[in-house]
Amino acid sequence: MIKTLPFLLTISLIIGCAGYKFQEVESALETGAPETAYTYLRKKAPKTPDIPYQFELGLVAHYANHFAESSAALDIAGDIAEDRYTKSVSKELGALITTDKLRPYSGAQYERLLSHYYRALNYVYLNQLDGALIECRRATALINYFKGEDEAYDFFGAAFLAHFSGMLFEAAREWNDALISYKQAAEYYKNAAEKTGVNAPAAIGHALLRLTRRLGFTDEFERYRDQYGEPPEHPENHGELILFYETGYVPPKTETALMFPILKTDKMNDAEKFVPTLITREGAVYEEVKLEYLLRVAMPTIGSIRPRFSGISVAVEDNQATDGVLVADVENIAIETFNKERPIILFRTLLRGVGKYLLFRQANKKNEALGILTNFAGVVSEQADTRSWQTLPNQIFMVRMPLPAGMHTLNLSFLDAKGQVLSSQSVPAIKINPNQITFWNHRTYE
């Protein structure tokens, strides 16, 4: 116990040290200055590369048009995440008696998948389509790994990545790979729809029809035509625009304090066996005469913060506007991912809390002042792990539309949840090549 006390106090100082401030990044992005946000993050680089800093740097660099630097930062994040699937025993043990912030952060599964989306876009903007296809294959391999590791894998984020991969393979005229990706996307959207609220976009059905017809898969084509109807025709000498509209921010994790009563009649010979009993007391109220101690623990939590802009409509010159389709609800994915993890986090947090309480009780028996100091150290070192990739968008919409070859001005209308236009913006000089797909992403923060 005497050896543990200074360790608890030291850890409380370590986890209190601040790096970059997200508010600085947020302010720069929202005022249209991604370069300022990028420069700020570069100046705040930690001595040792870590997640989620690399995620934030990579995405901000993407918006600042530093595409190679963006991919480099996201590659580092991916390498760290992969390495951390091999647990560090020393840090795991430390986390049990101090804070989850000591646990190696590997990034959520959906965060790791979305990093491939931005890496692939970086390659597209650098006119390196082969590099983008490599990212698609890496994303597919990661999804297959998640499926193999967890029989109850939820496919959060997998559907969008498979859908995006299908589009890129189609752009590269790799028809078989495109068909496989679209099939996977249809399956993954279906598997996750109940919790994410996002069904397979109609564009997937159109792509399945288009590709099975091109490849001469008659039986499959007939089956898909019965399911989806006739696909829209693509005019001759037209190209296609695929626009991804990213809006708002994914909700951050925040810290909340929970109180759990320890009763005078409780026997804690085995802390691990006692924790399930303690979990049942969340939110319970007991008479003061029955209480021995109120155990305070810090838990992460996450709530909804929907953006003001919740949709998009795109018109090109005088043509009829096309509405965006929701293809990834990152907020729902983040919340559902946390809800799935919360029981494990709560168990680990309470196990750690009971351990700190037993240290306090032992110290208090020997010396009341030492008990007070031990309790203080335990409380100060108790912090929730709120790490996440905060610059990710809240939702991603897709507009897919054929356009004549040439330069076009896009008229963007940003919509609220009821479909009413709240704001608009014109984007000039979007080049469309004949019989080719042009990719473009646009971000707002409101």
Image (tube, grey):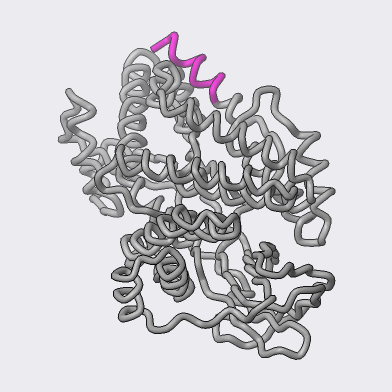
**Looking at the rendering, in which quadrant would you find the N terminus?**
top left
Which residue does the image show at 71% across and 89% down from the upper left? 319
Instruction: Measuring from the top left, give residue 405's x and y in whole percent.
Output: 75, 74
Q: Give the range drawn in magenta.
A: 1-11
Left or right for 108, reference 420: left
- Residue furthest to the front in view is 216
Left or right for 239, reference 210: right
Left or right for 164, reference 287: right
Indicate yes or no whether the magenta region holds residue 4: yes
Compare residues 22 and 74 and report the one nearer the observer: 74
11 w.r.t. 178: above or below: above
Instruction: Measuring from the top left, give residue 277's x and y in whole percent.
Output: 19, 41
Instruction: Measuring from the top left, give residue 5's x and y in whole percent.
Output: 46, 16
Compare residues 406 and 330 and report the one nearer the observer: 406
Indicate yes or no whether the magenta region holds residue 274: no
For the question of whether residue 308 can be seen, the reply is: yes
For the question of whether residue 302 can be seen, the reply is: no
